[in-house]
Each structure stands twice: as structure tokens, then as C-alpha cells.
Amino acid sequence: MSATFQKPPTAQEAVLAELRRFIVTGRLRPGEQFVQDALAAELGVSRVPLREALKILEGEGQVTYVAHRGYFVTQLSLPDLLEVYRIREILEAEAVRVGLPQMTTEDVDRLEEAEREVRGAAAAADVVRMTQANRRFHFALIEACGLPRLVRIVGLLWDATEVYRSVYFTESHNRERVEAEHRELVAAVKAGDVERTLDVLERHRRHAVDSLRPVLEAVGPDPDGVPQPGTAGRVPDELDLG
């Protein structure tokens, strides 16, 4: 087999990638229902790979299934978001304490490469590319701990808030702040300063939560505790990513 041969994605993998893109870009917004027949027709697939992809996203926390109603993009309340970020703070602090002292030159190079990718995407106001590069940046630090279960749990927490991270990146001043804080993180990591790294990460998370707080407060919970088809969970127009 040729070394350049790449196995084409399965229908499920292709659909999954496209649904992730829809969520990250805001094409499908928090609380919005997946209209499966329409999506399957648009993507040119049957409902089987679509349902399989939705189940994967449900397992990651990006999609919620409501009995007799269907699948919806997960909509977090402010308490939900605060809980996710609190758990992240605890686990990521452990990852940094374990991982930073054993980071290799290659690990640091990977961190710096991702930081440059974030800057390039921010300059182009490319929210999708910035979101992807931002995740690579943070996980270059987190994965250095060498604790796969911890890394997997942190990944699930990130999955659950990915759409809100994209909302955060739509604002130019937030993109500038992210760039500055990433530069601080790189400097702290290269200095081997665990406490300084943790301090920058704590501020980094707090700024994101403070920015997203009014978005979640504006949306508010549904009276029945679940999203309403076609209406609930809409991001306010001024933050629409479409």
C-alpha cells in the first residue's frame, strides 16, 4: 500500500466532522434541535450515520437527547458552566503540577507552534481555526502529565463547552486577551514556573466565564428544564455566529 494512501472517512466520520463544524461555527446553536431528515438530505446520507454521529456527540456532552422530542445542541445554564470550569480548574491544576516538570523540548515546541496558530487565526478572525488551535495549545500542556484518564476527562469537559468558547472568540477584544494570556503561559512554561502557570490559567478561565455570563443569563432556563424546538437556546443576535 502506498505510504501516501489515506483511508477515506466513513459516512459516520464525515457526518460527525460536519456536525462538529456546525456546532463550533454556530450554524447549530445551544438549545437548537437537530432536524434529522433535513440534515440527512443536506449531507447526502441516510439517517443511520447521522444517528450514530449524534450518539457520539451525546456521549461527549455536546448534544442532549430528550425523549419523544429528539436531539438538541446542549444548552448549559450558568451553574452548569461554573461547575464545568470549577472541575476543569481542579483537574488541569493537577495535570500542570505533574506534567510541567517533565515537559520535553518537543512538548514546548508543540505548545509554541499551537500558540502561533492561535495568533494567526485570531488575526484572520477565523473562529473555527482559532477554536481548534486553542484546544491544541491547551492540550499540549495538559497531555504532558502522562495521565490518560485525567486527560480524557478534561477532554469531555472541554467538549461540553466548545460552542460557548466559539462565542467568546467572536469578540475581537477577547481574541486579543487570549493571545496575551497564551504568551504569558508560554513564558511561564519555558521558565518551569508551575505556580505562575496555574495563576495565568486561572485568570484565563475566569475571563472566559465573565464574558459568557451575560450570554447565559440572557438566554435563561426553559420552564420545563429542556430546550424548546426551534426557539430555545438561541444565542442573542449580537453574538450570532451564523
Image (cartoon, rainbow, N blue to C red):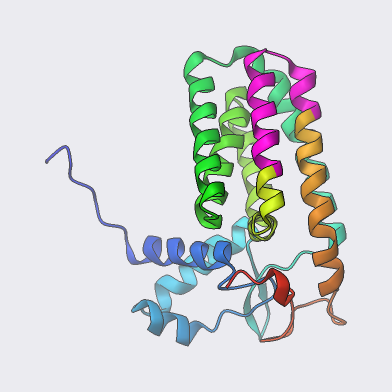
5 on left or right of 155: left
Q: Quadrant of the C terminus?
A: bottom right
- What's the magenta bit mostly, secondary-structure-wise? helix
Q: Is residue 44 above or below residue 24?
A: below
The mark tally for this picture is: 0
| Residue at 47% in and 68% down | 52
Please identify the quarter of the rendering in which residue 185 is found.
top right
104 on left or right of 226: left
Q: Nearer the viewer, residue 24 or 239?
A: 239
Please identify the quarter of the rendering in which residue 217 is found.
bottom right
Q: Nearer the viewer, residue 57 or 114?
A: 114
| Residue 75 in picture, x, y percent from top left | 73, 68
| Residue at 81% in and 74% down | 219
| Residue at 65% in and 48% down | 175
Task: Find out whether residue 185 is within the magenta segment.
Answer: yes
| Residue 137 in picture, x, y percent from top left | 57, 36
Q: Quadrant of the N terminus?
A: top left
The residues colored magenta run 177-199
Residue 206 appearing in the image? yes
Please identify the quarter of the rendering in which residue 18 is found.
bottom left
Q: Is residue 33 above or below residue 95?
A: below
| Residue 142 in picture, x, y percent from top left | 63, 30
Residue 235 appearing in the image? no
Task: Find out whether residue 194 is within the magenta segment.
Answer: yes
| Residue 199 in picture, x, y percent from top left | 81, 28
Q: Residue furthest left?
A: 1
38 on left or right of 142: left
64 on left or right of 212: left
